[in-house]
Amino acid sequence: HSYTFQLWAVANGTTSYSDKISFTTVDDKKPVISNVQISNVTADSYTVTCDIYENSEAGLNRVQFPTWTPYNDQDDIADSWATNSAVSGSLNRIDTHNYTATFRVVRSQHNNEVGEYYTHIYAYDTAGNRSDVARTSCRLTGNVTSISIVTTPMKTEYCLLYTSPSPRDCS
């Protein structure tokens, strides 16, 4: 935001003015991503949800959820994922500074590969600041019977317990 101000005073019928002074404030604070969760896990898809705090009232521009499997490296990650709407999450603005973002990962959009999936989350505000979070992961295979989530300051871990074919997977 840019601001200009000038002081003036009136004394004995005479108005005196100061010089005009202008300045611009710059938003250089990154959005803060928290409360990352994986839910609605099936053999073919899962949902990633997170909360985002944005310091500026101007708000968020977008949240991107690039996802890939380790099979053949990142051959299944979306082209131009930083701006590709195919990996943009849906944003719900809760109040002036708080949002919830949600994205559904679908196996058919990743060469129908089974196994481990990695999803990163990047939140961009309207000033161009970007925040990211450590990767999340989910295994798309078998029947999930439970999900547990462990969050530390540097990493969120998701542990999935399957009835088949794998006994237990954590990342």
Image (cartoon, rainbow, N blue to C red):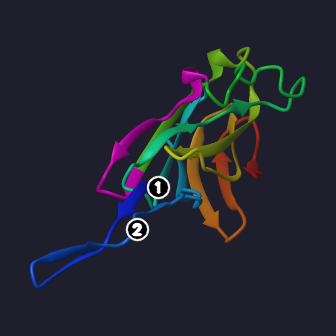
Residue 171, image x, y percentages: 76, 52
Could you say whether the residue bearing mark 1 is in a helix, strand or loop? strand
Q: Residue at x 74, y 14 (%)?
A: 111
Q: Is residue 72 above or below residue 38?
A: above
- Which image quadrant for residue 85? top right
Q: Residue at x 29, y 56 (%)?
A: 95
Tell me if I can see residue 55 in this picture: yes
- Which mark is first along the chain, 2 or 1? 2
| Residue placed under numbered mark 1 in the picture | 51
The N terminus, quarter of image: bottom left
Q: Residue furthest left?
A: 13
Q: Is residue 82 magenta?
A: no
Q: Residue at x 72, y 67 (%)?
A: 154
Tell me if I can see residue 40 in this picture: no
Tell me the kind of residue under disc 2.
Answer: Asp
- Which image quadrant for residue 97? bottom left
Tell me the kind of residue under disc 1.
Answer: Asp
Residue 67, image x, y percentages: 69, 32
Q: Residue furthest right?
A: 72
Q: Residues within 10 Å of mark 1 (few under 14, many from 20)?
A: some
Question: Is residue 61 shown left or right of residue 94?
Answer: right
Residue 105, image x, y percentages: 58, 29
Q: Of 91 and 146, which appears nearest the observer?
A: 91
| Residue placed under numbered mark 2 in the picture | 19
The magenta segment: 84-99
Q: Residue at x 72, y 19 (%)?
A: 79
Question: Is residue 4 shown left or right of residue 52?
Answer: left
Q: CA distance from mark 1 to mark 2?
A: 45 Å
In front: mark 1 or mark 2?
2
